[in-house]
Amino acid sequence: MRVLLAGGAGYIGAHTAVALLEAGHDVLVVDDLSNSSAEAVARVEQLTGAKIPFLAADARDVDALTAFVRTHAPVDAVIHFAGLKAVGESVAEPVRYYDVNIGTSIAILKLMAAEGIPTIVFSSSATVYGAPETLPLSEESPTGIDLTNPYGKTKRMIEEILKDAAAADPALRAVSLRYFNPVGAHPSGRIGEDPAGVPNNLMPYVARVAVGALDRVGVFGDDYDTPDGTGQRDYIHVLDLAAGHVAALEHAREGYEIYNLGTGTPVTVLELIAAFERAAGKKIPREILPRRAGDVAASYCDPSKAQRELGWTATRTIDEACRDSWNWQSNNPNGYARA
Ligand code: NAD
Ligand code: WQD
């Protein structure tokens, strides 16, 4: 298949590009580089030996997308990673989040209809579940419970748009992948997560403490109803996640499907820090802070639908994720900018 990766220069997009190319597919990338670097695409080319057509453009620009796709026709599928993803920022700038996240999705669906592209795989998120009523979370679990931030609402709205589009067009194949907490990096140390500024997420924050760029990790609450009182999450290695996209593309059928992509195994904040200490061979200073607003105590999935229907299962451990994250961070202390 030839696959357009919208947002393909980003963290998950770049790793998925490698997985697709290794599985024998072709990729082309559109990305406005608002949260990424063209260097990531260059490194994917180095890792795979492939030449990747790249368009630096806003994915809301249907005309630019159309010209790009026609130049590289036939394009068989789109994986839609493009969008803004910072939960706190989405509360402060809701209109920008709705504009970019919904706007890119609408533009891509218009492109697909006009150019006869049948398949879309969309980057949804476990965030659509909001505050879980029961664990583990299955695809049947209710969504939108206490969903307080615009970022999560955009993901839920885009899922609804895809469902409606698939109901109206019997030829459309639409898949939403609800990622749990993506972590880790390519074992080569050449591509990885490179958040701008101070990281919001736990793993890149811990990695920056380990490399000496930040003093200590703040642990957001140790009084949750969990084994050690700190928050539990389902951390999935980005290579497992990338493999999940290949499986979703190859199994996509007419209609609309949703899959959880996670390990099913909850890991606490303190367990993750301990795993990173083992990987880096150094102590990670930490400090217990109050709970972070909007956090849930625990979130982890039942991944059995993806296993059953896609033949996919996450195989990598939290120790492997920490090892690969540390390898990336220590080899690229300043990310892609000044490696
Ligand atoms: P990322 O920011 O690294 O990747 C997103 C990419 O989209 C970036 O390269 C950015 O430059 C690009 N982009 C943003 N707006 C664009 C626009 N208007 N036109 C073209 N490109 C645009 O993030 P990621 O972690 O790789 O996440 C990929 C997708 O997965 C996102 O949709 C995100 O919401 C979703 N997701 C991420 C996580 C996570 O924790 N990383 C979890 C669940 C879901
Ligand atoms: C994990 C755990 C924190 C940072 C977010 C988004 C979600 C999805 C993935 C896109 C929690 C604790 C964190 C720190 C800490 N993204 N923590 N100190 O909140 O589960 O999910 O990213 O879709 O939508 O909400 O991930 O990595 O921020 O937090 O103690 O400095 O680590 O409280 O228990 P989260 P996270």
Image (cartoon, grey):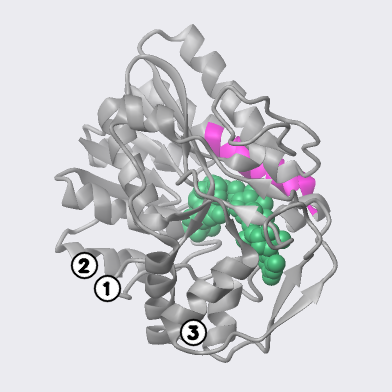
At 59% across and 34% down in the image, what residue appears?
Answer: 137
Reading the image, the residue beneath label 3 is 334
Q: Mark 2: which secondary structure?
A: helix
Instruction: Say what amino acid the circle numbered 1 marks.
Output: Ser
Q: Mark 3: which secondary structure?
A: loop
Q: Where is residue 103 shown, x and y percent of the image?
A: 60, 37
At 65% across and 86% down in the image, what residue appears?
Answer: 285
At 44% across and 84% down in the image, what residue appears?
Answer: 280
Q: Main secondary structure of the magenta part?
A: helix
In the image, residue 178 above or below residue 10: above
Quarter of the image where one finds residue 42:
bottom left
Quarter of the image where one finds residue 304:
top left
- Pick the quarter of the image with the N terminus: top left
Left or right of residue 229: residue 15: left
Are dots 2 and 1 in contact, CB under 8 Å? yes
Q: Callout 3: 10 Å neighbours few (<14), some, many (20+)? A: some
Left or right of residue 87: residue 185: left
Q: Which mark is residue 130?
A: none
At 54% across and 46% down in the image, what residue appears?
Answer: 180
State the extent of the magenta-drawn residues as a range: 93-105
Q: Where is residue 24 shown, x and y percent of the image?
A: 14, 45
Reading the image, the residue beneath label 2 is 47
In the image, residue 141 above or below residue 219: above
Q: Nearer the viewer, mark 1 or mark 3?
A: 1
Q: CA distance from mark 2 to mark 1?
A: 8 Å
Membership of 189 in magenta stretch: no
Q: Which mark is residue 188?
A: 1
Q: CA distance from mark 2 to mark 3?
A: 20 Å
Instruction: Say what amino acid the circle numbered 2 marks.
Output: Leu
Instruction: Say what amino acid the circle numbered 3 marks.
Output: Asn
For the question of whether residue 314 can be seen, the reply is: yes
